[in-house]
Amino acid sequence: MRRLLVALCLLTATLWAAPAFAQARSQLGPLCTTDTTPPDQMIDACNKIVALKVFKGEQLATIYFWRAVGWNKKGDYSKVIADTTEAIRLQPSQAVYNLRGSAYYDKGDYDIAIADFDDALKLGPPDGTIFHNRGNAWRGKGDYAKAIADYDATIKLQPKSTFSFQNRGIAKEALGDLDGALADINQAIRLDPTLPQPLINRTAIWRVRGDLDRAVADGSEAIRLAKEKPPVNIMTPPNSVLISGNIHRALAYEAKGDYAHARDDYKATLAIVASDAGSKANQATAKVRLSLVTDALTPIPRDAPSPVTQPAPQQTGAAPAPSPAPATPGKRLALVIGNGAYAHVKALPNPANDARAVARSLRDIGFTVSEGIDLDRAAMQKVTRDFLREAARAQVALVYYAGHGVQVDGRNYLIPVDVELKPGAGMTEAMIDMDTIMAGLDDQVRTNILIFDACRNNPMAQQVAAAGTNRGIEGASGLAAPTSLGAGATLGAGTLIAFATAPGQVALDGEGANSPFSAALSRHLGTPGLEVQQMLTRVRAEVVSSTKNKQVPWSNSSLLGEVYLAEK
């Protein structure tokens, strides 16, 4: 995402007048303080100036600022933050706070970024660039109203701010105002038709509207522009525009069912070096979806047995794989899994009942449901991958899981019924990686809802527990809060994750036919006109009451606007 640099004078014009610097100023000075200098040369020149120990105070702050600019060009945001922090210590300025705030933004630390932009605005007159950058951080946090207000302020100060029109359009799209979003992004394209970024964002709007041919056309033009003239603005993370263009066109191709072109674009996405959090999130998604479309393109050998649509004997109730026919725009898909008949850890009586109850509630409100009961690893992996493949053409994708879950090294895993929990190499390969599911679903044009009725307590150990009244495995770690996906991806925009219990706590299996959480969930899922987060609030209240405060459901959301599972 491109950000604008505050063009303030930081003594550059007078810095090299010092007599002690007469010998080197003709070479080092301009190399260090010219924004078009290649980053390695800029950093080297600034390093040599610092080593001379000629400047102090405000002048030295200037050198640290420009060296930070060099690090920013390279996408090394930790070093940007270190140098701008030193510059702020020596002499605070709008430009330095703005640059450090932008680095925090690129690392995904939105609250710190906003604080830096606030400080920048306090140091000087209103500045459209800083309002724009703060708007980006608000948008990163999902506060689209505040983002739009900051973009409005920028446009008032800078009526031809192409990127503020573009980003205001993105925020409007997040709030469901597609007409307003399209108008803003079209204005950005009119202001500068050579920029690829507005075309990439219009690609997403066409996908939301189901106009996939236009999406592919805009994505292709954006990629052409990004290759023909790579963005030179120093605040644009290296390679981020080309990565974004490839992933958006790939998703459009996949939605069309053109898996060959989608595969090529996903490969292109992964072949580029990513530096910022957004690009790493795109690559995490590309990795999962590349695997899915590659499977779809692999022909079944003629002598291969027919695909098994019924599970192994211990896995009663698994549904056949979803139909390969293209899903209709606006389709709502759900994957529901209940695992209780564990062979090597304590069995749970209720997950099968819970899954059937939730699946029935979802079908009643119009979801197409893939349902699996007591699945081993092979069956669980297949039904999950089939679901992720179909989700490329869905408007809403919902995943519900009841059973055992563990956390290993900060990543969450769902446990098939045939897994033995033994610490050691390869242990996680026998389980289903929740982060992979989340990365595969990460797409701003779709609403994703993931609901997990599993425990979230205790560290991993070798001993298997005896049967109990909750869904924890004694000595096995439960699910962690979602902080990252794979190689740097964050909780994707348009995603809600709900857990049956809070971090570090147990999820009760229940004394009746259902767990307290799933019983409440299946009752409230179909309530007409109830927004999904309000629905989960009612579920939480019921669970807290029925368990006498022993269990408190928990959720984390980056949903884009209000979502209704049952019609108003």
Image (cartoon, grey):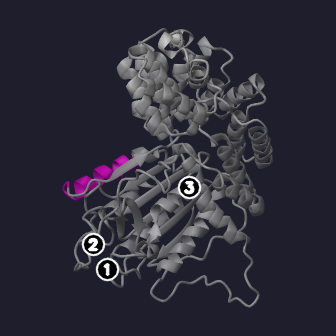
Which residue is found at the position 79% from the left and 38% from the top? 228
- Secondary element type, mark 3: helix
Q: Quadrant of the N terminus?
A: top right
Residue 393 occupies which quadrant of the picture?
bottom right
* Image disc number at residue 39: none
Q: Position of residue 333 (x, y in %)?
A: 58, 60
Is there any visible trace of residue 282 in the rendered image?
A: yes
Mark 3 highlights which residue?
Answer: 284
Mark 1 highlights which residue?
Answer: 347
Which residues lie in the magenta part? 535-549
Q: Position of residue 366 (x, y in %)?
A: 58, 58
Q: CA distance from mark 3 to mark 1?
A: 34 Å
Which-is-in-front pick, marks 3 and 2?
3
Magenta-colored segment: predominant secondary structure: helix
* Image disc number at residue 473: 2
Residue 13 magenta = no
Q: Position of residue 291 (x, y in %)?
A: 63, 66
